[in-house]
Image (cartoon, rainbow, N blue to C red):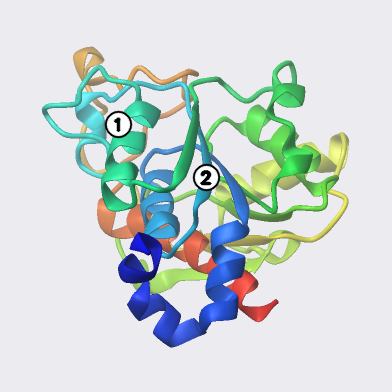
Amino acid sequence: MLYNELFARTELLVGPAAMERIASSKVILFGVGGVGSWCAEALIRSGIMHLTLVDSDRVATANINRQLPATTLTVGELKVEVMRRRLLEINPEAQITILPIIYSAETSASFQLEQYDYIIDAIDSLSHKVHLLVAASRTRATLFSSMGAALKIDPQQIRVAEFWKVRGCKLASALRQRMKKNEKPEKPFLCVYSEELLSNRGEEALPDADEHGSFRKAQTNGTMVQVTAVFGFTLSSLVIQDIVRH
């Protein structure tokens, strides 16, 4: 009964059959940072009932400008734990599974990707991202991926394209170079990206402003919530549109 009340406006738009498919779909989301956290919230607010969140990082002060779980009160907490609390406040009946684990070649088998209907990639590590995209492409699940959201300020330039057709994105280019040398994805998948590319104008963050992530970034780039959130909302929209169409 609560489900019907929470999502009455959504059902009015897409119909009861689509709502049943949304409620029964199983989604796993890798990364709940500037992109993934907003994607997770949008999925739950759209009626998704089965969502697994994967992220080993803890909230850092430098996350506050763009990440949903990050506030001055949550610094130091696991992002996935903060996200689960928030998502269950939105829909207490949702089944939110959290896995504070780093996805890697060594841990990939533990995620049992074959059990999901949708796999969403919103992670930053190049090597981990390559492995996830290739592994996910071998499953029956529909795969969506976020390309680089840093060094951008204009959400109107955000686009969606098949991975091999993404242009103007350094992350996509780096991924393709690695894949050409090793293994390539076995099926097409859509990506959220933007061709906008600005330069950092400020000085790099001081050591005490480090985000203490699960891997060391080669370079820290500026990011803004107006872009990262739209990346996340667009990923969630791709999932919901796909469910509604089928």
Which part of the image, by quadrant, shows the N terminus? bottom left
Task: Give the residue displayed 41% in from the left and 85% down from the top.
Answer: 12
Which residue is identified by label 2? 51
| Vertical order, 107 against 16 (above or below) | above
Look at the image and tell me whether residue 160 can be seen: no
Relative side of 56 to 64, left or right: right
**Which picture quadrant has residue 18?**
bottom right
Q: Amino acid at mark 2?
A: Leu
Image location (x, y in percent) of residue 184: 85, 44
Q: Is the residue marked by circle 2 packed among few (<14), some (14-19), or many (20+) residues within 10 Å?
A: many
Q: In the rendering, at what x and y percent does residue 226 appear?
A: 27, 59
Q: Position of residue 5 (x, y in %)?
A: 31, 69
Quarter containing the C terminus = bottom right
Residue positioned 82% across, 46% down in the render = 139
Residue picked out by circle 1: 82
Residue 139 in the image: above or below residue 169: above
Q: Is residue 142 left or right of residue 30?
A: right
- Residue in the image at 39% along x and 59% along y: 42
Give the left or right position of residue 168, taking residue 116 as reference. left
Residue farthest toward the left in the current orientation of the protein? 72
